[in-house]
Each structure stands twice: as structure tokens, then as C-alpha cells.
Image (cartoon, rainbow, N blue to C red):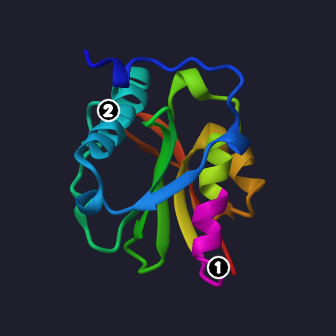
Amino acid sequence: MNSEFADHARPNRSAHDLDVHRGHWLDLDPRTTYGLARLRYEVFTMGQGITSEQDLDGADLDPTTTTYWVEDEGVPVATLRVLRGPSGLPAIGRVATSPTHRGRGLAGSLLRAAVADHDGETIDLHAQAYLENWYERFGFTRSGDPDVEAGIPHVPMRRRV
């Protein structure tokens, strides 16, 4: 394996030390795109056992989708995407942080950046139910009935303007 994509266990690097990047997959360096796909595979498929639904669903290639990520030594270690949901509103999804980088505020930094970039817009997300209280800290509230996606309880949430 390329050492560039080896695990990065750097206990002293926090969200304050790392920049939030944003872009569209077709405009990114192929190494970054690969790193984003690998990170999501690590978190969703290997970590959560999600195999019944396709993570790489093609939505990352839609011209309206923006991917946000944080890198450590050039390797993506946290990511999320914003796309236009069925409602036509921006929708945040695919929030993932490498296990080696959790607890450092990286996902929160990404979420704050995505919300700031959509200032004045209502934003949807479909949260894993155990993270509902965490998303509430960013102004999201439950907007419908819970359901199960890929075998994991989820709740629809919305951040209203």
C-alpha cells in the first residue's frame, strides 16, 4: 500500500490545525478523489458494515454536489457532501471521519463550513439516529418520522433559516 494512504494517528492535530477544503469530484486531483472514496469505504463499509446500499451512488458526480473534506498530511480524514435533495433544498450527507481522527472536532468544522456556505437556505439531512443530539448543536431539528436505512436507524432533520 502507498504510505501516503497509511493510517494517520496524530493525536495532537485538531480541527483548528487543519483546513476545510471544498470542491467537486471531477475537478479534484485523482489522489484526493481516491482518498475520499477510500475514507468512505473505511467508515461505511468496513466500519459500519453497510453493504446493502451503494455508497458511491453517482451523486458525487452531479454538478450541484460539493464535497467538503479535511486532510492530514495530504490524505482526507473527514468528509461530507452537500447535494440538492428531492425537496430541492441542500442536503448534507455521507458525513465520515476516519477512526484515527475522531473526537477532534473535524466533522463539526465541516458541518459549520457547509452551513455557512448555504447561509439563508434551509438544509436537510438524514442522520443516523444516535447522532441526533449532535446535529441539534448545529441548529438541526427532527423533521419527520424515524426510519431504517442500510439496517441503521435514521431520522430526517432540517436546519431552517
Q: Inspect the image, locate mark 2, and give the three-letter code of the amino acid beneath it.
A: Arg
Circle 1 is placed at which residue position?
A: 119
Asked if residue 148 lies left or right of residue 122, the reply is left
Residue 59 seen in render? no
Tell whether 18 sits left or right of 32. right
Residue linked to disc 2: 38
Residue 129 in view of the camera: yes
Residue at image point 74% right, 55% down: 136
The Cα atoms of the two marked residues, 1 and 2, are separated by 30 Å
Judged from the image, the secondary structure of the residue bearing numbered disc 2 is helix
The quarter of the picture where the C terminus appears is bottom right
> In the image, what residue type sits under mark 1?
Asp
Instruction: Give above or below for 88 relative to 18.
Output: below
Count the labels in the image.
Answer: 2
Q: Secondary structure at mark 1?
A: loop
From the top left corner, tell me how far across and down residue 5 is, in percent: 36, 24
Placement of the N terminus among the 4 image quadrants: top left
Q: Which residues are magenta?
A: 112-122
